[in-house]
């Protein structure tokens, strides 16, 4: 595993951009210079994040999301050494 998070990642298991191993390691998102903890999906190359819209749900029980544009900086919350020791 590299120290660079993927260009695009989603926390929805139905998405083709879902990666359980990466999410298990922990991802932090800095969007427009501020830390965000409510990001559902992001794309670094396209400069957007998708965040939940409060506690609103769609008719399938999934959170409603909105797309915000701006600079996205993902980073790992743990180092590969910490991840190996924890497993």
Image (cartoon, helix red, strand yellow):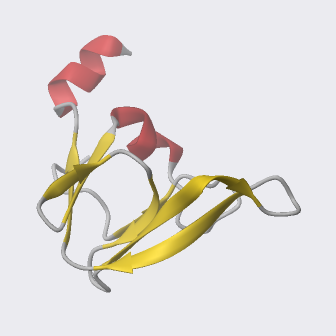
Q: Residue at x 69, y 55 (%)?
A: 56
Residues 6 and 73: in front is 73
Location of residue 21 in the rendering, given as x and y in whole percent from the top left corner = 45, 41
Q: Is residue 18 above or below residue 7?
A: above
Q: Residue furthest left?
A: 33
Q: Which residue corresponds to the image point at 21% horizontal and 31% vertical from the top-left? A: 78
Image quadrant of residue 14? bottom right
Is 76 on the left or on the right of 23, as rendered? left
Q: Position of residue 64 (x, y in %)?
A: 66, 64
46 to 82, vertically: above or below: below
Q: Residue at x 11, y 61 (%)?
A: 33
- Above or below, comparing residue 84 to residue 24 in the picture: above
**How many discs mark residues in the rendered view?**
0
Give the residue furthest to the bottom.
Answer: 46
Left or right relative to 60: residue 66: left
Q: Is residue 9 left or right of residue 6?
A: right
Query: In the image as oriented, which residue stretches furthest toward the right?
Result: 59
Q: Nearer the viewer, residue 73 or 2?
A: 73
Observer-nearest residue: 2 or 18?
18
Quarter of the view holding residue 81: top left
Residue 45 rendering spot, x and y as whole percentages: 27, 83
């Amino acid at each position: 595993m590299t120290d660079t998070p993927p260009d695009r990642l989603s926390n929805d298991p139905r998405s083709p951009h879902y990666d359980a191993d990466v999410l298990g390691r922990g991802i932090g998102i800095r969007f427009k210079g501020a830390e965000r903890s409510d990001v559902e999906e992001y794309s670094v190359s396209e400069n957007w994040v998708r965040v939940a819209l409060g506690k609103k749900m769609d008719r399938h029980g999934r959170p409603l999301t909105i797309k915000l544009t701006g600079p996205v900086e993902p980073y790992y919350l743990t180092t590969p050494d910490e991840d190996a020791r924890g497993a």
